[in-house]
Image: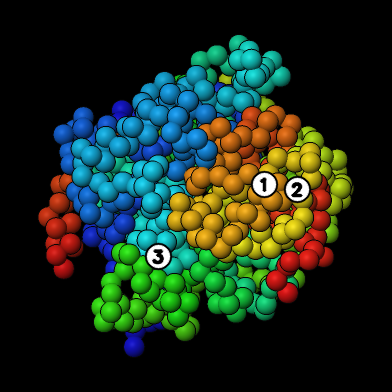
Amino acid sequence: MEAIEQHEGLVYALNRANIDTDQIIPKQFLKRIERTGFGQFLFYNWRFHDDGSLREDFSMNDPKYDGASILLAGDNFGCGSSREHAPWALEDYGFKVIIAPSFADIFYNNALKNGIILVKLDEEQIKEWQNRSEDGQLSLSVDLQNQTITDDSGKVVEFDIPSYHKEKLINGWDDIALTLLMEEKIFEFENS
Amino acid sequence: MGKPKTIIEKVWEQHVVHREEGKPDLLYIDQHLVHEVTSPQAFEGLRLANRKVRRPDLTYATMDHNVPTKNRDVIKDEISRKQMETLRKNCEDFGIKLADMFHPDQGIVHVIGPQLGLTQPGKTIVCGDSHTSTHGAFGALAFGIGTSEVEHVLATQTIWQDRPKTLNVKVEGDLGPGVTAKDLILAIIAKYGVRFGTGYVMEYTGEAIRKLTMEERMTICNMSIEAGARAGLISPDQTTVEFLRGREYVPKDEAFDRVSEEWLALATDEGAVYDHTVTINAAEVEPQVTWGTNPGMGVPVSGATPFVAESDNPDEVERALEYMGLEENQPITSIEIDHVFIGSCTNSRLSDLKKAAAIVEGKQVKDTIKAIVVPGSFSVKLEAEKAGIDKVFKEAGFEWRDSGCSMCLGMNDDVVPAGGRCASTSNRNFEGRQGNGARTHLVSPEMAAAAAIEGRFVDVRHFAGVAQ
């Protein structure tokens, strides 16, 4: 996992609650055995017509959001299936930070394993930035170390994140290698 | 006597390998279930890092998500075939037992775990699938994980987990005649929403839960994730013990008696305190039908779709109605369907099929409807055939298929076409879940069976064949 401490980028807002992992990455793309290349399928049924052409009525397809790397979303983002293909698709598409009032539990863990910064903020703040993002010009600067987000008007918003999660993201730690350092404790547990 | 504890705390505490202030706990995993869709990248990760599977003996694999449910000998979909071959190779290379497509123990992972007795009270069970919560019916702490976590469990047999809050979902009273476990869990989610369980492990308690069979308890726990809870469980009792007696992976004879004592002792202590409790009266629950695009968008069959303006989240309701092709305030019994799916890890066990068969016996599926029955496992299929249930379905006009996840998520050929409308016994009615543009209504097996006959939703309590 790549380490991430700071990120500055263009904002795209998807003002919907309960965006489930079936929407983030539909099932027909779960048959691949690779971990990469899922970005092209992100929000597939919302972004594309059946014949594969772009749906102009879906805001994310507007060129003004090209290169967006910070996603604003509604409550309970990532609910539903445990498919890690969802964070793989978001990350591969280019989203490094997702800001929402709440996230589903399994998605939260999966995103963390892939170096995506998840920020929980109250709906009012998200609404404000969502409105301001409509011209495709809003950029935010996320500082994980200091737990702040600064917008282009200079406004600074603080956020909470469990210190353990923060530490992992900043160091880009490989969980398995860390756990294997405790192998003796696992042996002990197995033999007790 | 120490402080009274919930089963959630007891099972958790028994599995802590390492605890450190300010960090999640490192939990030991007793049973890891693996399937073809969420595992290939995990095995690949092990290979790249030159790691082994720590406990192949605690790992069990099957193929369920994209297996065909007919003509299994020829898999036309190359990518699906490759995914299944990859699982076979991974299981060979890493020494993991596999129930492949032609194995007598094959089936939906959440059906075969309990069927084989791999699922037992007090175990920690994980699988790269969110409906792993199903196994909680036995008093196991069971939850879905992502592929990175699958890799972590394969390599270390442990997982890092934040200590959950505990939620008591207490169901008082009795379910009425013709009202099922599926209706109960749908009614709970309709009442409290799709995120009231987030951050919690749920325990279902109360009189109505105690009276449920194990298969009904599995239906309830299966849908805990649809309420946002990673895990939902039920304290073990004599019903649990009797279900497990004699199963393949369960201890035998005196060893079974000893282990059942331990299981029963796991039940939540009198006076244990939960972080939160909600109480439901089972007698008030009616047969349910979902009208929208998440499992919380449901109403009793006697009800109607909501008024947009009167709902808490008008935008969401309006979008859902539009996707579903429904009007506001439209009576549920006016909704005509063209597909029926009886199956999935929620409702594909023998008792589910028996109850649905009792409804359709001697009747005919409406000729505009395509109806399929997909047993949850190869063994369920054989047992049903022994009991003649396959004939009842076939004579009524249903297709009788081989076991797998099938039309619940449409990864194989079993999909609902765009604009099609399905009465489904599965667990998710998300946009596009059963096929791009498909519209899903979640119901019990009995309600799905009655809808197949009538061509629209009807109150199954007015149907012959319903257990009174």
Q: Nearer the viewer, mark 1 or mark 3?
A: 1
Q: Amino acid at mark 1?
A: Phe
Q: Which residue is mark 1?
A: B398
Q: Are marks 3 and 2 in contact (CB under 8 Å)?
A: no
Q: Are marks 2 and 1 in contact (CB under 8 Å)?
A: yes
Instruction: Say which chain tag 3 marks.
Output: B
Looking at the picture, tell me which residue is in the foreground, B107 or B60: B107
Question: Residue at left 73%, top 67%?
Answer: B466
Instruction: Find numbered disc 3 in the image and state the secondary structure of the residue it sits on.
Output: loop
Q: Counting residues from the N terminus, which is met first, the one under dot 2 or under dot 1?
A: 2
Q: Nearer the viewer, mark 3 or mark 2?
A: 2
The quarter of the picture where residue A5 lies is: top left
Q: Amino acid at mark 3?
A: Ala
Asked whether the viewer can see residue A12, the reply is yes
Question: Residue at left 27%, top 32%?
Answer: B44
The quarter of the picture where residue A55 lies is: top right
Q: Which residue is mark 3?
A: B140
- The numbered dot on residue B365 is 2
* Label 3 – label 2 distance at C-alpha: 39 Å
* Label 2 – label 1 distance at C-alpha: 7 Å
Give the crowd class for mark 3: few <14, some 14-19, many >=20 residues within 10 Å: many
Q: Specify the farthest residue to the bottom.
A: B1
